[in-house]
Image: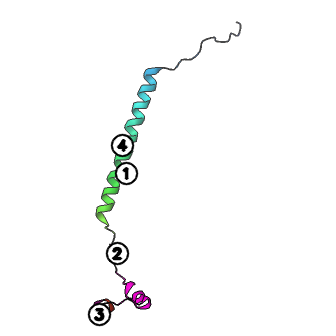
Amino acid sequence: MSARKSSRRRRVNIPVVIAAAGVAAVISAFVVALVLIGLVIADDRSPAPQPQPSVIDIGAGTSAVLGFHTTAAAHV
């Protein structure tokens, strides 16, 4: 018995590669769907409180300094 080196090269089996890519795509789509469903459920359960808008009239104080005449409503 002599030790022979195998001169055969291993070839890539294309159907196996395609099947593996398909399985990976299905698993990825499943994970993405679960995450999106989780985000929708989490968003519906706990709505974040919306901050109340505030209006600050900074023009009333600066217009008097610059010499502009303002109406009485601006000084309220």
Identified by mark 3, the residue type is Ala
* Nearest to viewer (mark 1 / mark 3): 3
Instruction: Give the mark nearer the N terminus: 1 vs 2.
Output: 1
- The image quadrant that residue 20 belongs to is top left
Instruction: Give the mark nearer the N terminus: 3 vs 4.
Output: 4
| Cα–Cα span, label 4 and label 2 | 36 Å
| Cα–Cα span, label 1 and label 3 | 56 Å
Q: What's drawn in magenta, residue-wise?
A: 49-73
- The image quadrant that residue 67 belongs to is bottom left
Reading the image, the residue beneath label 1 is 35
SS of the residue under disc 3: helix
Indicate the position of residue 52 as horizontal and vertical percent values. 32, 77
Q: Which residue is at 43% across, 88% downward?
A: 66
* Nearest to viewer (mark 3 / mark 4): 3
Query: Which residue is more in the foreground, 55 or 66?
Result: 66
| Cα–Cα span, label 3 and label 2 | 30 Å
Residue 28 to residue 6: above or below:
below
Question: Are the two marked residues, 4 and 2, in contact with CB atoms closer than 8 angstroms?
Answer: no
Q: Is residue 57 magenta?
A: yes
| Cα–Cα span, label 1 and label 2 | 28 Å
Q: Main secondary structure of the magenta part?
A: loop
Indicate the position of residue 29 as horizontal and vertical percent values. 36, 41
Instruction: Give the mark nearer the N terminus: 1 vs 3.
Output: 1
Q: Quadrant of the N terminus?
A: top right
SS of the residue under disc 4: helix
SS of the residue under disc 1: helix
Q: Which mark is residue 72?
A: 3
In this figure, what is the number of numbered marks? 4
Residue 57 to residue 50: above or below:
below
Q: Residue furthest top?
A: 1
- The image quadrant that residue 64 belongs to is bottom left
Reading the image, the residue beneath label 4 is 30
